[in-house]
């Protein structure tokens, strides 16, 4: 049983390109997440990608690694559940976290 | 406040304080309360006064020591009232303290107190110190008192007694003595206000000797009192009987040192030893002290001193009188001798004259007549010589010696006199040298006197010289002629020299040719020399000889002129020489035949038997130094038919008696070498001659001489002169008596010899001096070698058999050191074999000698000894075996027992159980086969092939035997000490023991197997080995070594995921209860598995219990727990309530759903109750053994248990279970079964999954669900999830990158904490951020989100341990 994760890319008019993740990200699907992130960044065409993690219930260091790898090009939107993780890991110091 | 004061406290409490200035105690200031408490709790005597009137308090010690009869009246009164009689003394001191606040100190102050009903002289050392109120003003005082009365008075009396007893050597007369005493008594007018000493007169009346403290002529001390004066001041009649009298006094009397005169006097007789009192002492008594034992003793000691003084003064006077009387007696004696000697001379002359004539007329008569006549002649001469000497003495003493001094050629005269003795010296084998030089002028001599001087000296020299010779010399020395007589004889001891010339003094115990003599020879010589105005001196060395030196002045100027006569014809010799020479010759052996013992020839008795007169005949040994007396006695006794041997002194008699053992010994008392008394002592001291009767003959008449002889052990005593008939009668009587006595002895000997038991007599040193036939039979030692001195020859050897030797030595100490006793000891027969004897002995006084002897008997107990040894060894072995817990223990016990039995240094056993080397067991517990010395290993290996149960002894090494051990053949070796021989009996015993050991080991082996079976069965009915998670259990059985009992716990998963929980308690404990318990437990489990309803299960159990003996009244707590939500349904059959502790600290007792114990009213329904345990709540189920204590309600124990659970809600269930058991254990351990079960909701999460990334999500789901049940808030849960996820990811990525493996996760909760463990079977690497940034981040996250993280990497895997606080 693989970890449940839904990834949706959006690029609505008038707003930044967005990657919305829902479910859990761990080492079993971190690569999927990283791939989706890369694809979304490519699609963003140089503008900052907003990664919406509001619906992510679990994120571990593998998922964090994908975020760190693209820290210069992304913004992260996260709920209170992931807040401490992003702060502790130091990601919040590098990128904008909403 | 008063509670500490004992009786005084109670009495103080009873005082109506409201009526005192202090008011009721409730209103007292704190300072007063404190003061009272201090006072009451002190054991030092104290009183205090408080307030304006100094209201009086005191403590127990003061009451006892000082207050006396004023108690309890004094409590609460004003001090001035309490001590009104001494207030005038006390008041200034009190006022001073109150005014100045300074403490007072008085030492030994005399106070007259009225505490015992009279005004009493008393001395006190005390200190008053101020007492202050709460506001620091002085409101009272505290007095600490110690009473010195006894000390002060005691010292005063001692001083008087000491002075009385002080040196009064200068006090001689009675008057001086009385004056001395009087001075001492007058110095103590306190204890002796006045005294008087009266002395009794001849008529029984008394006269005043001295007095103190009272004037002469006072009516109380009349100068004299008549014996029959009934109105006399002092009771003379009573006092003369020796009893002290207490007399009441009245009238106008002197008061001594006191204000008031005495009211009593103690009149004490002045006792004298063994007689009526000499007088009496009147001692007026101090009215301020009671007449107690001390006072009475003082007066009596005082009287004793006075009495002793009077007695010694009187005895001094008596001694002086006696000395004067003795001087008078001496004068009378001299006169008597003088008279009696004259009287002797007349009859002597009339004897000697006719005898001389008869000698002439009967010169041709038959030899016997001539011999008899010679005896008369010789003894007549001797008697005449003695009488003459006595007479000379008396004359000299009385100053009536008529000397006639004529000028004499001293050299020639002396040489002539000396030559008379030449033949006697020659006969004695002594050299005799006369060395005279011509003198320049004559010496004035009385020839008769001079003869006596020289003859006495020569006779003396012959008597005491045995070797060498005698030398006489005459020479001139200035104005003196010097004559010496020097011998090489026995000499005179230095301490005897001063008395050498003393009249009648004879030197005792010196060796001489004859013991005859009167002791006046030398005294006379000195007197005679003195009459010539010469001097005589003696020099002597004991054992070397004596030299007498006489110095006579030349000329005649020194002599009275009227006594001088012209020279008579020179060269003539007086007749006085004859008796001297005759006597001397009789001391010497006349012929060779006379020497030593003259014995009859062996054939003689038969030849003489015809001559015997009818009656008793006996063998008689005669000892006398006087040859005439010897011959006379021999003739006399032979004539009566006795067989006679004669000897010349005691030593020869003793030797003869030891050889010939005569029927009777007749001995003179005074003999040279060994006298008669010494002979008797020596005879009595030798067992061979102790019974031989001795008849002593002595010339010393008088009762005392006879008593001395009889005391020495003589049987009879006869004085010279005696009649022949009397002597023969005494001889007959003594022989008959002796025969009668030896008849008893023979009878006694026969009796003792007939004893089956050995009989012996030891002297006080332990030497065996008498034995019987059985003694010889048993030990092989006969009477011929008696006495047997310790160490006796039958003692075991001290070196080769030291233990046995030691045993005998101890018994010997018992024998000689105790009055009676018994002992059993090993001894050696004369032929060397070992015996055991049981002996009993008694100390008795030898009725003859009065000495301590030990009489004992013994018998051969060898057989019994070995039987007992066997029995006790078997018993000890049996005990060891029966106490052993298993085979190993048993074998150890057996070896120890064998070692003790044989006192062996070591015992080794090797079991050949099929292994490469035998299994070794030894008394040294660490010994292994490899460490055994080679000879020992060889010995054990050799033993293996020997037949079973046959002892093998190796000389001076040890003994071995082979035994069948359950595991194979066992070779057993006993190492023996060098001093412990292994006898045949030992071998038999070892074989016997070995048989028992073999059987015992097999029996224990069987028991071992049975025990193992029992243990397996016990384990089967113990609680479940596998518990559902979250549970901890404990079980403690009351009956050891059983591991089961009547209590149980049970917990098991039910089909629907719920958990059955049961704790129960059957009646009783031990095996019986355990069997019931096992069945109830199984039944209850089965019932719950079938229907998860606690009341239904209990009701079914009710019916089951009704059928199961012993199950009635068991109590059971039965519950069903849903671990998902903590919901517990339960029902209790009379069981103590379960305890629940919540995280918030609240505790609950699950005391609903209760009903009767099992088996009572089986058909009645049972209730059910519910309780929902919130997250992390802790549940404790237990049996009553945990909480039930004697004399303590059950609830107390439950409260204690509740408290422990409450306090332990933060620890793991295992720790908590341990804590409960520890903290509730009574001092001596649990005495009832205890079962308990601890659970914490929810149980821990335990997951095991393959190390694959795909497993992370379901693990997370399970953990998230568990965290929810544990009640963790979502934020914390998220952190735990991340930390756990990182740990698992690490395990998957690093631990099992190459090899697939398994990961285990365990999560458990306490009230406040979470505890996570992730274990993998791989190997971790330390984080390397540069290379693998996000993995390093994983560790960082774990540390950030958990409070405590440890990673332990080992060869078998890695353990990550993480803790997080749930409650911030």
Image (cartoon, rainbow, N blue to C red):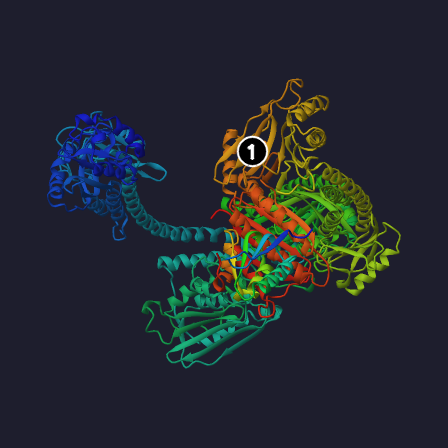
Tell me which corner region of the image, top left, top right, bottom left or bottom right, holds residue B358. Answer: bottom right
B69 left or right, relative to B544: left
Is any part of residue B196 visible from this angle?
Answer: no
Quarter of the image for the N terminus of chain B: give it.
top left
The answer to whether B769 is drawn above or below residue B1223 in the figure is below
**Residue located 83% across and 62% down the image:** B938
B142 left or right, relative to B332: left
B830 left or right, relative to B283: right
Residue at numbered disc 1? B1172
Quick one: B684 or B654, which is closer to the camera?
A: B684
**Residue located 13% across and 40% down the image:** B94
Quick one: B404 or B663, which is closer to the camera?
A: B663
User: How far across and how far down the image is residue B811, in percent?
Assistant: 65, 49
Q: Name the chain letter of the residue that bears numbered label 1.
A: B
**Residue located 25% across and 48% down the image:** B163
Tell me which corner region of the image, top left, top right, bottom left or bottom right, holds residue A8. Answer: bottom right
């Amino acid at each position: 049983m693989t970890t449940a994760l839904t990834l949706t890319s959006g690029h609505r008019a008038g707003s930044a390109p967005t990657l919305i993740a829902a479910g859990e990200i761990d080492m079993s699907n971190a690569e999927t997440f990283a791939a989706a992130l890369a694809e979304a960044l490519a699609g963003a065409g140089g503008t900052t990608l907003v990664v919406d993690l509001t619906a992510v219930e679990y994120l571990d260091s593998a998922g964090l690694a994908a975020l760190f790898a693209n820290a210069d090009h992304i913004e992260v939107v996260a709920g209170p559940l992931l807040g401490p993780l992003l702060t502790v890991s130091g990601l919040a110091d590098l990128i904008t976290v909403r | 406040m008063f509670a500490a004061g004992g009786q005084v406290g109670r009495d103080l409490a009873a005082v109506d304080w409201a009526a005192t200035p202090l008011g009721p105690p409730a209103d007292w200031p704190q300072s007063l309360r404190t003061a009272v408490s201090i006072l009451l709790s002190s054991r030092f005597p104290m009183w205090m006064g408080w307030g304006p009137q100094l209201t009086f308090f005191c403590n127990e010690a003061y009451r006892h020591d000082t207050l006396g009869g004023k108690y309890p009246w004094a409590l609460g009164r004003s001090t001035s009232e309490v001590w009104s009689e001494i207030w005038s003394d006390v008041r200034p001191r009190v006022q001073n303290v109150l005014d100045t606040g300074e403490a007072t100190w008085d030492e030994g102050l005399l106070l007259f107190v009225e505490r015992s009903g009279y005004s009493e002289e008393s001395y006190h050392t005390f200190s008053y110190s101020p007492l202050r109120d709460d506001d620091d003003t002085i409101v009272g005082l505290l007095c600490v008192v110690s009473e010195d009365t006894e000390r002060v008075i005691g010292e005063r009396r001692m001083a008087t007694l000491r002075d009385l007893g002080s040196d009064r050597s200068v006090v001689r007369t009675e008057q001086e003595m009385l004056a001395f005493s009087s001075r001492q008594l007058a110095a103590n007018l306190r204890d002796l206000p006045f005294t008087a000493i009266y002395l009794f007169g001849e008529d029984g009346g008394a006269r005043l000797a001295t007095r103190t403290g009272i004037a002469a002529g006072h009516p109380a001390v009349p100068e004299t009192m008549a014996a029959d004066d009934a109105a006399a001041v002092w009771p003379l009649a009573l006092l003369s009987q020796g009893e002290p009298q207490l007399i009441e006094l009245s009238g106008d009397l002197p008061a001594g040192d006191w204000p008031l005169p005495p009211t009593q006097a103690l009149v004490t007789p002045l006792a004298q030893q063994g007689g009526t009192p000499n007088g009496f002492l009147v001692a007026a008594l101090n009215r301020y002290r009671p007449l107690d034992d001390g006072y009475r003793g003082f007066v009596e000691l005082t009287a004793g001193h006075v009495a002793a003084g009077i007695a010694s003064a009187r005895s001094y006077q008596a001694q002086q009188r006696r000395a004067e009387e003795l001087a008078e007696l001496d004068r009378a004696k001299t006169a008597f001798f003088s008279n009696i000697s004259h009287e002797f001379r007349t009859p002597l002359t009339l004897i000697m004259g006719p005898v001389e004539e008869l000698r002439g007329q009967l010169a041709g008569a038959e030899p016997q007549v001539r011999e008899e006549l010679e005896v008369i002649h010789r003894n007549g001469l001797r008697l005449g010589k003695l009488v003459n000497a006595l007479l000379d003495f008396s004359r000299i003493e009385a100053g009536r010696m008529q000397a006639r001094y004529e000028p004499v050629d001293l050299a020639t005269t002396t040489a002539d006199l000396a030559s008379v003795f030449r033949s006697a010296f020659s006969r004695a084998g002594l050299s005799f040298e006369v060395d005279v030089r011509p003198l320049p002028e004559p010496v004035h001599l009385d020839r008769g006197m001079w003869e006596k001087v020289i003859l006495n000296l020569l006779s003396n020299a012959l008597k005491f010289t045995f070797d060498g010779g005698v030398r006489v010399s005459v020479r001139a020395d200035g104005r003196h002629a010097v004559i010496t007589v020097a011998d090489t004889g026995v000499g005179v001891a230095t301490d005897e020299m001063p008395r050498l010339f003393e009249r009648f003094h004879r030197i005792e115990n010196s060796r001489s040719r004859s013991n005859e003599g009167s002791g006046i020879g030398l005294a006379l010589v000195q007197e005679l020399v003195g009459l010539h105005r010469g001097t005589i001196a003696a020099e002597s060395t004991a054992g070397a000889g004596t030299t007498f030196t006489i110095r006579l002045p030349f000329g005649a100027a020194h002599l009275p002129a009227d006594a001088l006569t012209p020279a008579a014809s020179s060269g003539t010799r007086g007749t006085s020489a004859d008796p001297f020479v005759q006597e001397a010759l009789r001391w010497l052996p006349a012929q060779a035949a006379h020497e030593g013992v003259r014995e009859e020839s062996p054939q003689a008795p038969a030849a003489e038997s015809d001559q015997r007169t009818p009656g008793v005949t006996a063998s008689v040994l005669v000892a006398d130094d006087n040859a005439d007396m010897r011959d006379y006695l021999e003739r006399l006794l032979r004539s009566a038919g006795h067989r006679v041997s004669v000897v010349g002194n005691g030593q020869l008699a003793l030797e003869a008696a030891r050889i010939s053992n005569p029927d009777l010994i007749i001995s003179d008392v005074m003999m040279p070498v060994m006298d008669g008394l010494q002979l008797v002592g020596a005879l009595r001291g030798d067992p061979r001659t102790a019974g031989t009767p001795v008849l002593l003959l002595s010339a010393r008449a008088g009762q005392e001489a006879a008593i001395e002889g009889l005391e020495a052990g003589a049987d009879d005593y006869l004085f010279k002169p005696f009649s022949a008939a009397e002597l023969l009668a005494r001889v007959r009587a003594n022989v008959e008596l002796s025969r009668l006595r030896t008849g008893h002895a023979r009878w006694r000997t026969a009796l003792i010899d007939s004893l089956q038991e050995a009989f012996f007599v030891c002297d006080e040193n332990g030497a065996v001096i008498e034995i019987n036939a059985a003694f010889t039979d048993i030990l092989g030692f006969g009477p011929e070698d008696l006495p047997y001195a310790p160490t006796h020859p039958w003692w075991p050897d001290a070196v080769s058999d030291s233990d046995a030797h030691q045993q005998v030595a101890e018994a010997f100490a018992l024998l000689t050191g105790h009055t009676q006793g018994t002992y059993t000891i090993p001894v050696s027969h004369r032929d060397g074999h070992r015996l055991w004897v049981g002996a009993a002995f008694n100390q008795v006084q030898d009725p003859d000698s009065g000495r301590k002897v030990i009489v004992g008997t013994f018998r051969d107990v060898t057989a019994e000894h070995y039987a007992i040894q066997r029995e006790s060894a078997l018993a000890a072995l049996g005990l060891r075996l029966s106490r052993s817990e298993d085979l190993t223990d048993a074998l150890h016990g057996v070896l120890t027992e064998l070692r003790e039995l044989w006192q062996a240094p070591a015992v080794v056993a090797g079991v050949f159980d099929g292994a490469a080397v035998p299994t070794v067991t030894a008394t040294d517990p660490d010994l292994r086969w490899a460490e055994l010395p080679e000879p020992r290993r060889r010995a054990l290996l050799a033993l293996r092939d020997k037949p079973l149960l046959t002892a093998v002894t190796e000389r001076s090494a040890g003994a071995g035997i082979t035994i069948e051990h359950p595991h194979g053949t066992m070779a057993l070796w006993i190492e023996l000490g060098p001093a412990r021989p292994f006898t045949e009996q030992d071998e038999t015993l070892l074989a016997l023991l070995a048989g028992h050991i073999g059987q015992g080991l097999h029996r224990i082996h069987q028991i071992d197997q049975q025990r193992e079976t029992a243990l397996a069965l016990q384990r089967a009915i113990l609680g479940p080995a596998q518990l559902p998670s979250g549970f901890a259990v404990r079980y403690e059985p009351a009956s050891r070594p059983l591991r089961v009992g009547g209590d149980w716990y049970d917990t098991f998963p039910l089909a629907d995921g719920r958990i059955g929980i049961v704790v129960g308690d059957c009646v009783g404990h031990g095996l019986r209860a355990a069997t019931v318990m096992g069945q109830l437990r199984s039944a209850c489990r089965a019932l719950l598995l079938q229907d998860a309803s606690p009341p239904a299960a209990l009701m079914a159990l009710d019916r089951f219990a009704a059928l199961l003996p012993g199950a009635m009244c068991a109590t059971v707590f039965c519950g069903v727990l849903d671990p998902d939500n903590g919901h517990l349904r339960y029902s209790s059959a009379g069981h103590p309530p379960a305890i629940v502790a919540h995280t918030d600290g609240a505790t609950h007792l699950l005391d609903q759903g209760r009903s009767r114990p099992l088996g009572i009213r089986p058909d009645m329904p049972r209730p059910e109750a519910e309780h929902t345990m919130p997250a992390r709540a802790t549940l404790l189920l237990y049996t009553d053994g945990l909480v039930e204590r004697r004399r303590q309600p059950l609830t107390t124990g439950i409260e204690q248990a509740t408290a422990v659970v409450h306090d332990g809600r933060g620890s793991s269930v295992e720790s908590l279970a341990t804590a409960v058991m520890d903290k509730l254990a009574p001092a001596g351990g649990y005495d009832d079964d205890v079962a308990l079960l601890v659970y914490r909701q929810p149980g821990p999460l335990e997951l095991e999954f393959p190390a694959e990334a795909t497993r992370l999500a379901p693990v997370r789901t399970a953990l998230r669900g568990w965290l929810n049940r544990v009640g963790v808030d979502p934020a914390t849960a998220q952190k735990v999830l991340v930390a756990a996820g990182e740990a698992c990811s690490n395990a998957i990525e690093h631990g099992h990158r190459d090899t697939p493996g398994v990961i285990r996760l365990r999560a458990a909760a306490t009230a406040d904490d979470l505890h996570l463990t992730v274990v993998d079977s791989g190997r971790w690497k330390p984080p390397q951020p540069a290379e693998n940034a996000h993995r390093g981040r994983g560790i960082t996250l774990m540390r950030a989100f958990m409070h405590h993280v440890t990673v332990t990497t080992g060869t078998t895997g890695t353990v990550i341990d993480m803790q997080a606080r749930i409650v911030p």
